[in-house]
Image (tube, helix red, strand yellow):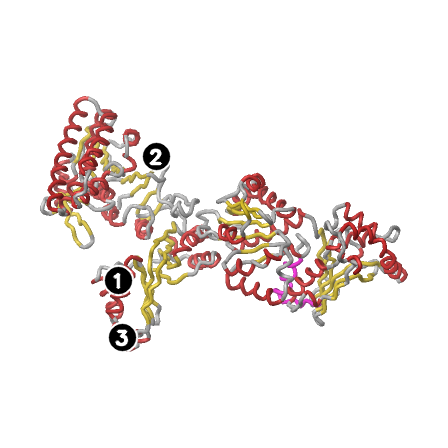
């Protein structure tokens, strides 16, 4: 005969008629001829019954009505599921039970107090009703092999309550089950969960999660092959799905892993309730009543899962207490005194951390016990505090404990490094750390407000979920809109290949913004147009930098000084910044220094490749040269596609003003060509490169030759174009003079490391010079270094245009993702 299999269904699984029909179908589809079926009370009934006892103690009105409502609920289920004699018998028993409960409640009302026995007796009726009803229903359906028997667990399980809760009296319980259950016959036993009897034979309960405990006990008593715990989730999840939506079902766990996860708050069977199954090495399956075809999670002695870290979980509302003092060093018994005092006052310690110097001991406790714990510790060490042997007792409230759990962590290199790197990248500060010798668990105390972000960051770092990046984009104009379109075109590939979840959560223009949990990349224009609100940079920042998401990036595609001024605050708070905006890096040196310090302080990444040369790898090349020890001697370049076009095409056959007007008509200049001809944008790029070289340059240090005649500096754009021909002759003279010497004119910026000199303006070059032989609107940069001396390193290509600029910003964003641990 096959071994028994035990199923346990919780209150949500048998909440109503439909649920009970579903459970019956599950059991009838189980081919095993011998099943033990442990049921909880219908959802909410146990709490409702305990509420009646409390209401009677307080002599509240309406107790009878509330009892009648509970009775009516069970009567309604019976009316739908049972017929004939089984229906009549159940209703008669239900009515008798309710009369008995009413009598108990009346007694409680009179004496204004309820004994624990009375509470246990009343609260246990829910399991009596659910199992009587369901056993009658399953028997009436007639599809299970053998007998369908109702089993009152009070006739089987005998327990004795102690400091650790109810302990099973195994010898007595085995004798009881031997009398009540035939060992070799096919049968389906419908068993009451939660309830038992104590050593005196009085009714008692197994406490919260008691029905799970019942299932484990009966699994051991019946020597079951497996225990199936049916809930409303698909199995044990790798994290709380409310905080980590991408949490996945863990295929298998060891008993130890399940206990660790359960201790730290994961929705797993309670550690104590697993004990009987663990003692007999009975596998436990966690399955979903509402999706019975899913495999669920198996908890067993030797799981097959290859995951190093099985799950991440957390405990919130924790306080951290730190006892510190030089007088503790080398003194035996300090920890004994500390934790003995806490034990004597019923204070539960969740986590302990102590350095090898013994200078301090810190421990985590439930926040609700923080004030009492501080008083207890101060009293226990009153003498040492007064004498200065212990300097302080510090209590930090508002903490959480984050735990990463997995048997595979034992002996695996780099696990702790990955955990702390993930937290560092998410700007989460760790206050205390604990890890047992088993290496199965790394626990950290962190700020409670960062709990969700920390959980998600660590979860992501082990590829249990995609790396979620919260993105806010400011300036969805020419470049910004193209960038969003590029992101949309690659989002699916990046999710599949890099495990990246690029979540656009905010878009802002100069006057409007749209915030959402996730803005569709293929519908952002409609969302911005239809659901926008007044722009508010503070609210925008707060939304993008959400606590429940591990990483935030703000992309600034504007040319705004106001937006650039926010960079230091963003970086200091851990927000990564990516931008083609040149204003920040070319601002005064005091601001530039604050910017770099904020980046270091916040541990954030600040990338701006597109500020010079759009998508060309100019800044990255410069950094690589310096980082590998090369000495930068000189940098020269043409950093403006507009000015490159003007001097590539102007051959003197037509006035310079005509070439400028033509370039504007073709879209090669800004709406006001003076923005290009002034050379100021060009000079900002030179400043950015100079500072990357290590030169301390201000914008005013650049020797700048503007091509805007001073007389036309303050007029309107149209007037400027109309009057520019008045100044063609001086420009033509420059061209003629250069040609007379066999030279060409080019607008060039240069940086000299030896002198610290920065210049921007027209220069004469040989016709064979690199800068004289580029495509019409190309940017070109030439690096003269110790290594690249005889033959300088040249970077050349399109240095303007929305596609290449957006591509440069996109590349920077992917670099940040890689720095944050995305799988490339």
* Element at label 1: helix
Q: Position of residue 645 (x, y in %)?
A: 78, 52
Q: Position of residue 658 (x, y in %)?
A: 83, 50
Give the CA separation, mark 3 to mark 2.
Answer: 59 Å
Q: Quadrant of residue 157?
A: top left
131 relative to 116, above or below: above
From the viewer's perspective, tell me whether residue 412 is left or right of residue 368. Answer: right
Q: Which circle marks residue 290 in the picture?
A: 2
For residue 130, say whether it is visible. Answer: no
Q: Which residue is mark 3?
A: 384
Q: Residue furthest top?
A: 84
Q: Quadrant of the N terminus?
A: top left
Q: Quadrant of residue 107?
A: top left
Q: Which residue is mark 1?
A: 372
For residue 449, say whether it is visible. Answer: yes
Q: Nearer the viewer, mark 1 or mark 3?
A: 1
Give the CA separation, mark 2 to mark 1.
Answer: 44 Å
* Element at label 3: helix
Q: Which residues are magenta?
A: 618-633
Q: Mark 1 and mark 2 in contact (Cβ < 8 Å)? A: no
Give the CA separation, mark 1 to mark 3.
Answer: 19 Å
As for residue 626 lying within the magenta part, the answer is: yes
| Marks 1 and 3, the one that precedes in the sequence | 1
Q: Nearer the viewer, mark 2 or mark 1?
A: 1
| Marks 2 and 1, the one that precedes in the sequence | 2
């Amino acid at each position: 005969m096959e071994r028994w299999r035990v199923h346990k269904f919780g209150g949500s699984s048998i909440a109503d008629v439909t649920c009970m029909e579903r459970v019956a179908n599950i059991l009838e589809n189980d081919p095993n001829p011998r099943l033990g079926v442990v049921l909880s009370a219908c959802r909410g009934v146990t709490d409702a019954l305990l509420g009646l006892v409390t209401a009677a103690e307080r002599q509240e009105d309406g107790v009878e009505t509330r009892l009648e409502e509970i009775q009516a609920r069970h009567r309604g289920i019976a009316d739908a599921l049972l017929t004939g004699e089984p229906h009549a018998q159940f209703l008669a028993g239900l009515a008798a039970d309710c009369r008995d409960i009413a009598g108990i409640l009346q007694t409680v009302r009179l004496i204004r107090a309820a004994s624990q026995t009375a509470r246990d007796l009343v609260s246990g009726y829910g399991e009596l009703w659910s199992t009587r009803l369901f056993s009658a229903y399953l028997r009436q359906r007639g599809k299970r092999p053998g007998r369908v028997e109702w089993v009152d667990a009070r006739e089987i399980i005998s327990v004795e309550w102690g400091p650790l809760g109810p302990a099973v009296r195994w010898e007595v319980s085995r004798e009881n089950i031997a009398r009540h259950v035939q060992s070799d016959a096919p049968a389906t036993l419908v068993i009451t969960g939660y309830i038992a009897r104590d050593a005196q034979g009085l009714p008692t309960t197994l406490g919260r999660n008691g029905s799970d405990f019942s299932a484990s006990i009966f699994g051991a008593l019946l020597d079951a092959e497996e225990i199936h715990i049916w809930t409303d989730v698909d199995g044990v999840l790798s994290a709380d799905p409310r905080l980590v939506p991408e949490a996945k079902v863990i295929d298998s766990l060891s008993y130890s892993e399940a206990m660790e996860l359960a201790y730290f708050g994961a929705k797993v069977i309670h550690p104590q309730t697993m004990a009987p199954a663990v003692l007999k090495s009975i596998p436990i399956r966690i399955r979903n009543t509402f999706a019975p075809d899913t495999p669920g999670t198996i908890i067993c002695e030797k799981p097959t899962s290859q995951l190093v870290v099985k799950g991440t979980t957390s405990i919130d509302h924790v306080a951290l207490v730190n006892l510190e003092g030089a007088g503790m060093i080398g003194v035996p018994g300090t920890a004994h005194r500390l934790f003995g005092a806490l034990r004597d006052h019923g204070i539960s310690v969740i986590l302990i951390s102590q350095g090898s110097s013994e200078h301090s001991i810190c421990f985590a406790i439930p926040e609700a016990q923080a004030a009492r714990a501080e008083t207890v510790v101060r009293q226990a060490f009153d003498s040492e505090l007064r004498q200065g042997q212990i300097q302080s007792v510090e209590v930090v409230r508002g903490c959480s404990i984050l735990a990463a759990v997995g048997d595979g962590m034992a002996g695996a290199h780099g696990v702790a490094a990955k955990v702390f790197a993930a937290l560092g990248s998410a700007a989460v500060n760790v206050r205390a750390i604990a890890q047992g010798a088993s290496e199965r668990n790394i626990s950290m105390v962190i700020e409670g407000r960062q709990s969700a972000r920390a959980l998600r960051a660590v979860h992501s770092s082990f590829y249990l979920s995609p790396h979620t990046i919260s993105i806010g984009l400011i300036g969805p104009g020419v470049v910004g809109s193209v960038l969003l379109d590029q992101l949309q075109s690659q989002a699916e590939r990046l999710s599949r290949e890099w495990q990246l979840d690029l979540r656009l959560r905010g878009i802002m223009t100069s006057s409007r913004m749209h915030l959402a949990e996730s803005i569709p990349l293929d519908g952002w224009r409609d969302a911005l147009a239809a659901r926008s609100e007044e722009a508010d940079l503070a609210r925008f920042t707060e939304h993008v930098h959400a606590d429940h998401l591990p990483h935030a990036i703000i992309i600034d595609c504007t040319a705004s000084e106001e937006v650039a001024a926010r960079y230091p605050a963003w970086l200091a708070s851990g927000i990564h910044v990516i931008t083609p905006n040149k204003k920040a890096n070319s601002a005064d040196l005091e601001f530039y220094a604050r910017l770099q310090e904020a980046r270091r302080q916040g541990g954030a990444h600040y990338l701006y490749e597109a500020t010079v040369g759009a998508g060309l790898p100019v800044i990255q090349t410069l950094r690589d040269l310096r980082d590998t020890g090369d000495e930068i001697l000189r940098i020269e370049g043409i950093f403006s596609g507009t000015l490159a076009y003007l001097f590539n095409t102007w051959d003197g056959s037509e006035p310079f003003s005509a070439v400028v007007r033509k370039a504007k008509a073709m879209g090669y200049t800004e709406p006001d060509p003076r923005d290009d001809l002034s050379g100021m944008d060009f000079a900002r790029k030179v400043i950015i490169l100079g500072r990357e070289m290590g030169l301390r340059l201000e914008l005013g240090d650049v020797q700048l030759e503007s091509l805007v005649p001073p007389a036309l500096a303050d007029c309107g754009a149209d007037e400027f174009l109309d009057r520019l021909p008045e100044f063609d002759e001086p420009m033509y003279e420059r061209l003629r003079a250069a040609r007379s010497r066999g030279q060409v004119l080019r607008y060039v910026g240069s940086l000299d490391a030896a002198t610290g000199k920065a210049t921007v303006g027209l220069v004469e070059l040989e016709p064979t010079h690199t800068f004289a032989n580029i495509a019409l609107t190309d940017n070109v940069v030439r690096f003269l270094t110790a290594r690249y001396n005889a033959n300088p390193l040249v970077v050349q290509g399109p240095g303007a245009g929305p596609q290449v600029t957006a591509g440069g910003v996109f590349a920077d964003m992917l670099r940040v993702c890689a720095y944050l641990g995305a799988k490339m």
